[in-house]
Image (spheres, rainbow, N blue to C red):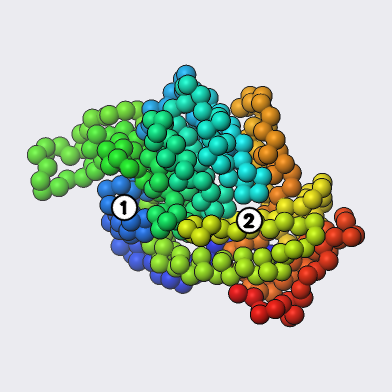
């Protein structure tokens, strides 16, 4: 089976984990501190503005708590969004307000977000669909103007940038995922950043039972002789990442540039083979000042053939999927208003395999099977434009 997503983990990660195991300290400790500092450098922010968490979902829940969202507040988010974002809003007793998305990029435009703002909008959550930054810079400016907090779910965008600035640091809070389907993988895990370091202090307490003082260990400087006593700042939970995960994260971060380069090559190969094929649309080009992590590669079809194409590809040993099923159709969110552009996108779009371990042969096999599947549905379309060997100038 050709996987749609796949991590690249190997001997370097194994060695790093081995070191942690033999160090006799596998909880959150020095390795995690180091990974946080490295990730802060990757984002080009001070180290006191980032903190690991045990998942991006937890980061989303924390973010809503940190910005003080509660009953009576609205939080705007695109309907094409990860379910954890909707849940993080609803779990605070606030109302998720879904906005429409651009049907080609699946990101909301700044106008889509603006149209959804209400008098009681306290925050906006956006993601960067497939790693494409979209209008996030303009959305950040809109939120600043209106005094609304912006949370970036940067799970797709670990290496994405706008004008050289990392996605995830353009708003007030950013969160990342390192789960097994992401580009940078630590098994499970995540990162949270905040513009205001005070929010990181609070997040640290919330992620560790609400303890006033996070370390429960004796230190030379401690005035109390009873280091096991504590006070609480809130009633909270435990959602930390450990040194085993962080050791993997450090190695993955070093490899991230190579991962993204290979993903870019795969995307170019898909683009070259699929551009201009009747009945299939490829993702719009990336604006010159944007960098993508290339997390998803998606195609869109004319007419109602997506589901059958996905089935045919599965039968041919190629796993595809669609991210993210529209949240405004989930009954629990009780949404009523139509979002026609998103409805169009979620019925036409299919995410093809994209990961750094894909070979050129895998890409070619996927394209062949895709074109055959489309031809079965629409005999007149999906004529292959180039054969792999006859591609002019080869594949970039
Ligand atoms: C955009 C987005 N946000 C958040 C998450 C949640 O990440 P985690 O599995 O680390 O909780 C995911 C996971 O698929 C995601 O795709």
Is 339 above or below relative to 175?
Answer: above
Q: Nearer the viewer, residue 268 or 368?
A: 268
Give the crowd class for mark 1: few <14, some 14-19, many >=20 residues within 10 Å. some
Is 129 above or below relative to 343?
Answer: below
Is 287 above or below relative to 76?
Answer: below
What label sits on residue 45 in the rendered view? 1
Question: Can residue 246 be spotted in the picture?
Answer: no
How far apart are the alpha carbons under marks 1 and 2? 30 Å
Q: Residue furthest top?
A: 72
Give the crowd class for mark 2: few <14, some 14-19, many >=20 residues within 10 Å. few
- Mark found first going from the N terminus, 1 or 2: 1
Residue 102 sits in which quadrant?
Answer: top right
In this figure, which residue is indicated by the disc labeled 2? Answer: 284
Question: Can residue 380 be spotted in the picture?
Answer: yes
Horizontal and vertical percent for residue 176? 45, 49
Residue 43 sits in which quadrant?
Answer: bottom left
Give left or right: position of 271 versus 192: right
Say which residue appears at 38% left-offset and 62% top-offset: 250
Q: Quadrant of the C terminus?
A: bottom right
Q: Residue furthest right?
A: 379
Horizontal and vertical percent for residue 268? 62, 68
């Amino acid at each position: 089976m050709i996987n749609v997503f796949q991590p690249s983990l190997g001997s370097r990660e194994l060695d790093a984990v081995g070191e942690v195991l033999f160090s006799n300290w596998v909880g959150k400790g020095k390795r995690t501190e180091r990974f946080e500092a490295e990730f802060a450098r990757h984002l080009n922010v001070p180290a006191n503005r980032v903190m690991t968490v045990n998942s991006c979902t937890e980061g989303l829940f924390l973010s809503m708590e940190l910005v003080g969202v509660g009953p009576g507040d609205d939080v705007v988010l695109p309907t094409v969004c990860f379910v954890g974002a909707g849940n993080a809003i609803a779990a605070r007793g606030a109302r998720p307000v879904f906005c429409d998305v651009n049907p080609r990029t699946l990101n909301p435009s700044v106008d889509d977000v603006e149209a959804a703002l209400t008098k009681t909008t306290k925050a906006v959550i956006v993601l960067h669909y497939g790693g494409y930054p979209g209008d996030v810079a303009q959305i950040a400016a809109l939120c600043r103007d209106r005094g609304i907090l912006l949370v970036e779910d940067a799970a797709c965008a670990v290496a994405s940038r706008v004008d050289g600035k990392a996605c995830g640091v353009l708003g007030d809070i950013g969160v990342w995922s390192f789960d097994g389907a992401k580009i940078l993988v630590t098994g499970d895990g995540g990162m949270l950043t905040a513009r205001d370091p005070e929010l990181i202090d609070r997040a640290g307490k919330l992620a560790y039972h609400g303890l006033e003082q996070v370390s429960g260990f004796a230190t030379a400087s401690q005035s109390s002789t009873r280091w096991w006593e504590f006070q609480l700042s809130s009633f909270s939970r435990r959602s930390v990442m450990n040194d085993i995960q962080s050791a993997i994260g450090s190695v993955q971060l070093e490899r991230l540039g190579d991962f993204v380069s290979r993903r870019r090559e795969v995307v170019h190969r898909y683009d070259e083979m699929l551009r201009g094929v009747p009945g299939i649309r490829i993702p719009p080009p990336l604006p010159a000042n944007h960098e993508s992590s290339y997390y998803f590669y998606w195609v869109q079809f004319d007419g109602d053939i997506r589901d059958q194409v996905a089935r045919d590809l599965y039968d041919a040993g190629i796993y595809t999927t669609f991210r993210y099923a529209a949240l405004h159709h989930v009954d629990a969110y009780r949404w009523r208003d139509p979002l026609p552009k998103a409805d169009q996108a979620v019925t036409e779009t299919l995410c093809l395999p994209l990961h750094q371990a894909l070979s050129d042969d895998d890409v070619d096999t996927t394209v062949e099977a895709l074109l055959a599947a489309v031809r079965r549905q629409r005999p007149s379309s999906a004529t292959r434009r180039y054969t792999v060997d006859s591609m002019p100038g080869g594949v970039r």
